[in-house]
Amino acid sequence: FVRRSHSAVDSYFERMLVREDEALRASRSIGASKGFPQHEVSPLQGSFLKLLAETAGAKRILEIGTLAGYSTIWFARVEGIERVVTLELEPERAAVARENLARASLDHLVDCRVGPALDSLQAMTEEDPFDFVFIDADKQNNPAYLTHALRLAAPGSLILADNVVRDGAVVDDASDDPRVRGVRDMATIVANEPTLDATALQTVGKKGWDGFMLMRVK
Ligand code: SAM
């Protein structure tokens, strides 16, 4: 008897496809042991992000929302990567992420900036353009994060926002959940932004029913 479930399928493909080493495993387990929320991308999603950034030839990646650095490690392992800038509100999480990156011998590639991401983004006035932006922090600020991403991303860049489906709540136009409103307001920006090509992909798996919004700056 094979128990079929989204989680079981994730586990199967993780075993078959994902090369999650000790550094990646440690970044998940140390975050959990510190009581951080287990909101990191799944191993299959981390591998997907790395493949996508590699396919796009990303050299400079901006990540909004670090947590313990799990997705950051995937990004820092993109072939040909030159710099990952990752933004985290909580000093303790940023400190743990830095330790995790050092354990993975990737700390020389990553600049982890602590504080509200909106402040860090506003301070980025002299920054070289990014070619991949991952939006994965407080969802109510997604519209502002997208606006900054458009300012900081070079033509041809990819912008990917996580958790845009939220168990289907995204279709509720009367929702007063600020995270749902954040996704919907971001979608409205995309709908009116002629420089963006975009799509959304629903996902199921260990992280439940959710999805990515993928955008490309023309
Ligand atoms: N990208 C991470 C991964 O996949 O491993 C997960 C990031 S987690 C979903 C979101 C993170 O964003 C949390 O660590 C949270 O502390 C951080 N965050 C929340 N509000 C923020 C803000 N205003 N500025 C910067 N970071 C924020």
Image (tube, grey):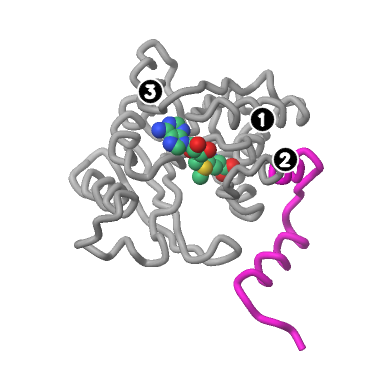
Is residue 136 magenta-colored?
no
Amino acid type of disc 3?
Leu
Decide which of tag 2 and tag 3 comes sooner along the chain.
2
The residue lying at 21 percent from left, 62 percent from top is 173
Query: Looking at this rendering, what residue extends furthest in the bottom direction?
Result: 1
Sequence-wise, the earlier of marks 1 and 2 is 2
- Confirm or reject: label 2 Cβ below 8 Å from ligand 1: no
Circles 1 and 2 in contact, beta carbons < 8 Å: yes
Query: Residue 96 bears which disc, if any?
Result: 1
Place residue 28 in its image quadrant.
top right
80 lies left or right of 142: right
The numbered mark, 3 or 1, whose residue comes first in the sequence reads 1
Frontmost of labels 3 and 1 is 1
**134 vs 218, nearest the viewer:** 134
Task: Read off the residue under disc 2.
Answer: 30
Q: Position of residue 183 (x, y in %)?
A: 32, 50
* Residue 137 image point, x, y percent: 44, 40
Q: Nearer the viewer, residue 151 or 34?
A: 34
* Image location (x, y in percent) of residue 128: 44, 16
Is label 3 in contact with label 1 (beta carbons under 8 Å)? Answer: no
Which residue is under mark 3?
121
Position of the C terminus by quadrant: top left
Q: Residue at x 60, y 49 (%)?
A: 38
Q: Amino acid at mark 2?
A: Ile
Please name whichever residue, 185 or 202, is drawn nearer the observer in this view of the structure.
185
Q: Is residue 68 visible?
A: yes
Magenta span of residues = 1-30
- Whether the magenta-drawn stretch holds residue 25 is answered as yes
Q: Is residue 196 left or right of residue 25?
A: left
Vertical arrangement, residue 178 with respect to residue 75, above or below: below
Q: How many marks?
A: 3
Cα gap from disc 1 to disc 2, whole angstroms: 8 Å
